[in-house]
Amino acid sequence: MAIGHDDVSIMQVEDAVEALDHEQRARFDRLFHVSSTHGRLVPPEAMVPWIENQFGSVEPTLDQKIVKVTNVVTLEGVLFNWLRSSRPMWRQEIKLDEELERTSSDPLFDPYTGTPEDLFGRVQGQYCVTASNIAKFDGFHGLVVFNERHPLRFTREQIHDYVDTGGRWGDLAHASDPDAKYYMFMWNCLWRAGASLLHGHAQVIMGRDMHYAEVEYLRRCAAVYQAHYRSNYFDDLFAAHESLGLAFQNDGTKVIANLAPKKENEVLLFAPLVSTSLKDRIYEVLAAFRDRLGVSSFNLVIYTPPWGETPESWEGFPVVVRIVDRGDPSSRTADFGAMELYAASVVSSDPFVLARTLRECM
């Protein structure tokens, strides 16, 4: 029986794992290692008013429980401490509508005159059009430029069209060079997520020789897992999350509130192909981020298996979507530091709360 009680939080994840049956526990343990520790401190009296103002009271800071979760297959690790969300940060209010009006130079405003096109031309969608990226990641690197300038004003139909238009761009890139077969769709929303332009847009790339390093690493990890346990990594990852109430299926698409996220509120979606269901789930996750969780800056990526024959095996590798919250755009403090780059992610959001929100929205 899956554990998904309304009051379960990441701080109780060890108890939730203990309650799993034998088969569920064995599967969970071959995917994750979970532990906890406590951080304790003694503040001077002079600091008490500042702590109370920042954190509400002194007590939560005196004995802090920190939960450590590691995906032992991919070695993605995270340290959870909700108190981190209340640490002091410098903020400056941002009004996107006013920012858009103030933008004096927007090359995406008229992409037909402000952006180059690929050698195979442009792909025209109902709500977007493609362009060739002027400073390229790879030989084939394009933009999907949204007609709607405001990056957070998206509808279900628009999300479908953005993804479909990117796919049609990929078809043309692959047709023009059959050796280019490793496709990725990316959306960096706002500066916190790495966007250099405010105008809404996504990016598409198509590479040769091997998939991009993170995707190839995931493929190799999944292959080693398959060889060792005779079980599909992605199926087991979903089942392990589902047993804790962190995952569910909706119309053939698997939805996961990641227990080992890159940063806050990471969602994983698995599907056999880029289907209507998958595009619906992408929209619903983004709408939940925007309308329920107050997220305005995010990264989204769609990994697909290669678009042609390859020497390496991609058997059992689904279409993978990863969507992650990149924090408050009004904060000057970056969400990636030395820990995230060289050790493990430090996260204050709760995947159990995220899973409940996703269920309600879907």
Image: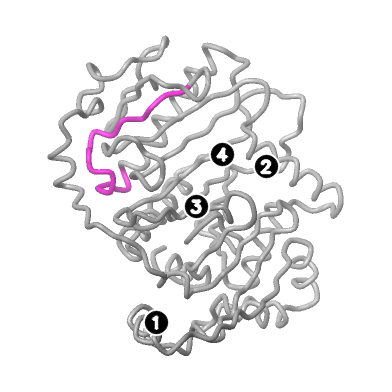
Is 148 placed above or below 87 here?
A: above
Disc 1 target residue:
51
Q: Tag count in the figure?
A: 4
Residue 171 on image: x %, y %: 49, 22
Marked residue nearer the N-terminal end (3 or 1): 1
Residue 30 on image: x %, y %: 79, 62
Is 166 placed above or below 78 here?
A: above
Quadrant where the C terminus lies? bottom left
Give how far apart the Cα atoms at labels 1 and 2 are: 48 Å
Give how far apart the Cα atoms at labels 1 and 4 are: 44 Å
Give how far apart the Cα atoms at labels 4 and 2 are: 10 Å
Marked residue nearer the N-terminal end (2 or 3): 2
Marked residue nearer the N-terminal end (4 or 2): 4
- Which numbered marker is on residue 303? 4
Disc 3 target residue:
336
Range drawn in magenta:
141-157
| Residue at 69% from the left image edge and 77% from the top image edge | 17
145 is within the stretch colored magenta = yes
Give how far apart the Cα atoms at labels 3 and 4 are: 22 Å
Question: Mark 2 or mark 3, which is nearer to you?
Answer: 3
Question: Mark 4 or mark 2, which is nearer to you?
Answer: 4
Residue 136 on image: x %, y %: 46, 22
Q: Amino acid at mark 3?
A: Phe
User: Within 10 angstroms of label 3, few (less than 14), some, or many (20 or more) residues?
Assistant: some
Quadrant where the N terminus lies? bottom right
Residue 347 on image: x %, y %: 52, 64
> Which residue of the protein is positioned furthest toward the right in this rendering?
228
Q: Is residue 247 left or right of residue 357?
A: right
